[in-house]
Image (cartoon, grey):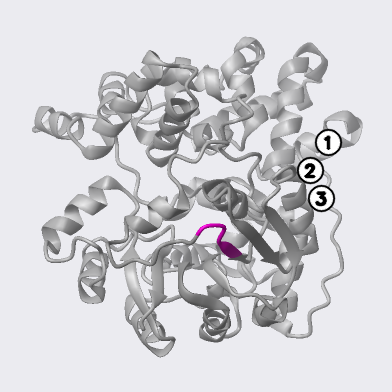
């Protein structure tokens, strides 16, 4: 994820109240100037405009979606003024609830109960509609909220109070099903679960029914097996409204960007549980979208999540054999996949071979520099990373890193589910890129860079100041210089749009 930036309202609360469990924060000498600057950033302005538009038309689908997306991108900017909007949208079947998995808890932060009084905290949660909705609808992606809820979960179990708080107990069962049982727990809780079988799934939910993964190549087989046990990514539903079409996205790459034809043929290579495939299908409703994936278990999730999307076809197929589909594609999306292949450039070449003349591709790759924080986390975990991966190993890894956070890792949404942690810290194979390797690969594959994506408006502003000659984000050297100055920028991944060079 991009680095988290403290927002003005939360800074004011921190200064006035101190952080829960820490010494009160002291304002720096230039606090007023800092607060003024923070309220004048592009993200702050966009969020304020979106919130105003929602208040003017709360039932407008585009206004709701735009505000939800901005809260997803910058949850640190959420405050109490956004509570009515979040409460109105978190259970909306047309809105992705993951957009509130952190922002919702940020807005509730000042009013959350003290876990030191678990009975009072449980009563507050039992009666609070928004808190229950956030627990039931999406993973809890906030460490303070997780601490509160896991403390209350422990109290409910040890004190045999689940029947007294049925709404909260049911919500915790649902949360564990979403996050895969990611929250750590102690030996006393494990022993107590034997006498509370009805609450066992709030700690250790039933794993997915893993299906046979029969690929010949060892790395391919191991990757497929991982996603068979821990389907990824974790999501519940996607936004029904696309804020802009796929064609509009490509036009933003410049006047020389290829034009998406009518009724285009689109490939999503390595679709996992289907989130990106569904979003692309909705951005291009006249397209035929084929999404391929190694893991049959992940595909089963994708079929359930994407049911009803008529222009989307989901297939179990190896990316290396994509030519066997017998098709050419006008647009190919491959996000977070190539760096998990035994030979990423060979997999990339296989995709280029099925790219139609005039076609474009969206590629996302791990940054070797940004992943240094992940490497640091693995070093901190020591020999734990060498043990056979299990939910218990993942919970222990989370316990250690919660106690000693590494922001680029513990702030990632992947940190809050077992499947996410497996993908983030325990993946069976990854081969990261740097910008020079991307440049060499694009040259060798006969591709040209149309645009690389910067994660926030603030990054885009800083890049313009560094490289005013490159408004379309096509200069590899300037891209590298920016990453050297801001090494955590691409912690999410490098994302780029490319086309054939000829």
Residue 396 makes an appearance in the image: no
Say whether marks 1 and 2 touch (CB < 8 Å). Answer: yes
- The local secondary structure at tag 1 comes to helix
Q: Nearer the viewer, mark 3 or mark 2?
A: 3
Q: Which mark, residue 207? A: 3
Q: Position of residue 428 (x, y in %)?
A: 65, 72
* Residue at the farthest bottom position: 444
Q: Which residues are magenta?
A: 262-267
* Cα distance in 3D space between marks 3 and 1: 13 Å
Residue assigned mark 1: 200
The earlier-in-sequence mark between 3 and 1 is 1
* Cα distance in 3D space between marks 1 and 2: 6 Å
Kindly indicate the quadrant of the structure image that contains residue 386.
bottom right
Q: Is residue 46 left or right of residue 295?
A: left
Q: Is residue 477 left or right of residue 427?
A: left
* Cα distance in 3D space between marks 3 and 2: 8 Å
Residue 298 makes an appearance in the image: yes
Q: Position of residue 65 (x, y in %)?
A: 47, 31
Q: Position of residue 434 (x, y in %)?
A: 37, 76
Q: Which mark, residue 204? A: 2
Kindly indicate the quadrant of the structure image that contains residue 271.
bottom right
When the figure is inspected, residue 130 is found, relative to residue 419, above or below; the finding is above
- The local secondary structure at tag 3 comes to loop
Pointer 3 local density, CA inside 10 Å: few below 14, some 14–19, many at least 20: few
When the figure is inspected, residue 327 is found, relative to residue 118, above or below; the finding is below
Q: Residue at x 60, y 78 (%)?
A: 341
Q: Residue at x 74, y 32 (%)?
A: 174
When the figure is inspected, residue 231 is found, relative to residue 322, above or below; the finding is above
Q: Residue at x 46, y 31 (%)?
A: 68
């Amino acid at each position: 994820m991009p680095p988290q930036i403290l927002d003005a309202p939360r800074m004011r609360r921190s200064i006035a109240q101190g952080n829960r469990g820490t010494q009160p924060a002291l304002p720096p000498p230039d606090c007023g100037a800092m607060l003024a600057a923070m309220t004048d950033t592009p993200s702050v302005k966009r969020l304020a405009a979106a919130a105003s538009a929602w208040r003017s038309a709360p039932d407008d689908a585009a206004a709701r979606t735009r505000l939800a997306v901005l809260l997803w991108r910058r949850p640190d900017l959420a405050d109490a003024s956004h509570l009515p909007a979040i409460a109105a949208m978190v259970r909306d079947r047309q809105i992705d609830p993951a957009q509130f998995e952190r922002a919702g808890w940020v807005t509730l932060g000042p009013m959350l109960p003290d876990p030191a009084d678990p009975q009072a905290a449980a009563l507050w949660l039992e009666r609070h509609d928004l808190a229950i909705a956030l627990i039931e609808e999406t993973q809890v992606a906030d460490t303070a909220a997780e601490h509160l809820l896991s403390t209350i979960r422990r109290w409910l179990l040890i004190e045999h109070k689940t029947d007294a708080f049925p709404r909260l107990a049911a919500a915790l069962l649902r949360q564990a099903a979403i996050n895969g049982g990611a929250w750590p727990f102690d030996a006393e809780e494990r022993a107590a679960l034997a006498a509370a079988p009805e609450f066992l799934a709030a700690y250790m939910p039933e794993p997915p029914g893993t299906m046979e993964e029969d690929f010949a190549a060892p790395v391919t087989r191991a990757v497929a097996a991982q996603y068979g046990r821990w389907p990824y990514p974790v999501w519940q539903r996607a936004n029904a409204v696309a804020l802009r079409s796929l064609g509009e996205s490509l036009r933003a790459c410049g006047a020389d960007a290829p034009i998406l034809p009518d009724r285009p043929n689109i490939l999503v290579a390595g679709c996992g549980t289907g989130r990106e495939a569904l979003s692309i299908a909705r951005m291009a409703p006249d397209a035929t979208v084929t999404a391929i994936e190694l893991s049959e278990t992940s595909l089963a999730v994708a079929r359930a999540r994407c049911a009803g999307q008529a222009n989307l076809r989901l297939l179990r197929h190896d990316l290396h054999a994509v030519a066997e589909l017998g098709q050419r594609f006008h647009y190919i999306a491959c996000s977070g996949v190539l760096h998990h292949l035994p030979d990423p450039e060979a997999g990339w070449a296989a995709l280029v071979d099925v790219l139609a003349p005039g076609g474009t591709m969206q590629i996302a790759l791990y940054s070797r520099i940004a992943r240094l924080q992940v490497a640091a986390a693995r070093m901190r975990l020591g020999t734990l990373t060498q043990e056979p991966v299990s939910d218990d190993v993942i919970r222990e890894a989370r316990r250690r890193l919660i106690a000693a956070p590494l922001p680029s890792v513990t702030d990632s949404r992947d940190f809050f589910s077992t499947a996410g942690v497996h993908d983030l810290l325990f993946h069976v194979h990854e081969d990261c890129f740097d910008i020079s390797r991307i440049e060499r690969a694009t040259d060798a594959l006969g591709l040209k860079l149309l645009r690389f994506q910067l994660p926030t408006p603030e990054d885009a502003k800083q890049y313009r100041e560094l490289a005013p000659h490159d408004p379309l984000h096509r200069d590899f050297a300037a891209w590298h210089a920016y990453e050297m100055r801001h090494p955590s920028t691409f912690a999410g991944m490098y994302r780029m749009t490319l086309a054939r060079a000829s």
